[in-house]
Image: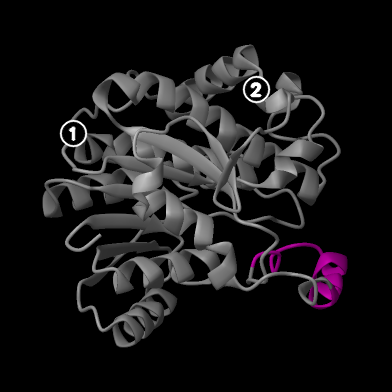
Amino acid sequence: MKGKIVVITGANSGIGKATALALAKKGATIYMICRNRRRGEMARQDIMAESKNPNIELMLCDLSSMGSIKEFGFTIRDRLDHIDVLINNAGAMFGSRLLSLDGIELTLALNHIGYFLNTHYLLDLVRKGTDKRIINVASVGHKSVKNVNFNDLQNKINYKQLKVYCETKLYNIYFTQLLAEKLKPEGITVNCLHPGVVSTNFGNSGTWYFKIMLPIGRAFMIAPEKGAETSIFLASSPKVKGITGKYFDKKVETKPSRLAQNEKYAKKIWDITMNLTGVQEFGQVVES
């Protein structure tokens, strides 16, 4: 990984920070994409000190905002001529139904559309990289989703935080599979993963009951360093070179749910997302 350029969203805490640190120790140049400057800078200093790698950069982006993602996309395109590994990691769960700046249900906006649009704006840079790897952090929670309600994708009716979160993780797998198929002729690999049930700040934005139960649940959770192992593996291991469109758990390729293998649903979610984001041709960015 020495000298490779790695972009990681949500890199100021939890799995993202642990992934950034491990790859920094391998000699990669890390671009941490964070929403909060203070927390991002604190994490950057921590990573530089522990890894003894000075090549750690912080850039700001609200990955629930289409405008912010677009602005970030053009900014980083001015700074970099290529990206070797892109890791879409940032995500959250919200206790009540909230809307993004674009008027989209916030979990969907951050966890799914954030992955989709961020990759759209950075794909040209990945095309010019060497490893050419895209990694999406999904979740085994997708297996709890039994059907996709296309009439209420934004959960205006009967909002439940965990249900909505798991739906977005299903969409991460759909996105991974379709994007892998589209990019395979270009030698770009796209894979996703379940990190494990990890003890992080995740869930702090949940309902009061969820926050109360969280400390109890953490006793049975794994450390962020353990949760980051599959992301690190997919980003750096020669064992997965050329493997694409797959779902990994504990660094092992495994099958996602039957619903996650529904190609018709995957294509429908892709088309809806294209419409919501206004993207005309994925990965083709129009200068404006």
Viewer-nearest residue: 35 or 146: 146
Please name the residue shown 34% across and 47% down the image. Answer: 238
- The magenta stretch is 202-216
In the displayed structure, 252 sits above or below 34; it is above
Whether residue 118 is visible here, answered yes or no, is no
Rendered view: 225 above or below 266: below
Residue beneath the point at 52% across and 63% down: 228
Q: Residue at x 77, y 50 (%)?
A: 161
**Left or right of residue 261, residue 285 in this image:** left
For the residue pair 171 and 252, the one nearer the viewer reads as 252
Element assignment for label 2: helix
State yes or no: residue 63 in magenta.
no
Residue with the mark numbered 2: 261
Residue 264 appears in view: yes
Task: Name the element at disc 1.
Answer: loop
Which quadrant holds the C terminus?
Answer: top left
Q: Mark 2 or mark 1: which comes first in sequence? A: 2
Q: CA distance from mark 2 to mark 1?
A: 37 Å
| Main secondary structure found in the magenta portion | helix
Tell me, yes or no, whether the highlighted magenta stretch contains residue 212.
Answer: yes
Q: Quadrant of residue 142?
A: top right
User: Hey, what amino acid is under mark 2?
Assistant: Gln
- Nearer the camera: disc 2 or disc 1: 2
Mark 1: give few (<14), some (14-19) or many (20+) Cα within 10 Å.
few
User: Is residue 256 rendered to the left or right of residue 82?
Assistant: right
The x, y position of residue 7, in whole percent, is 32, 55
Q: Amino acid at mark 1?
A: Ser
The spot of residue 23 in percent (x, y) is 34, 66
The disc at residue 288 is: 1
Q: Residue furthest top?
A: 264
Q: How far across and how far down the image is residue 229, in percent? A: 51, 61
The quarter of the displayed image where residue 211 is located: bottom right
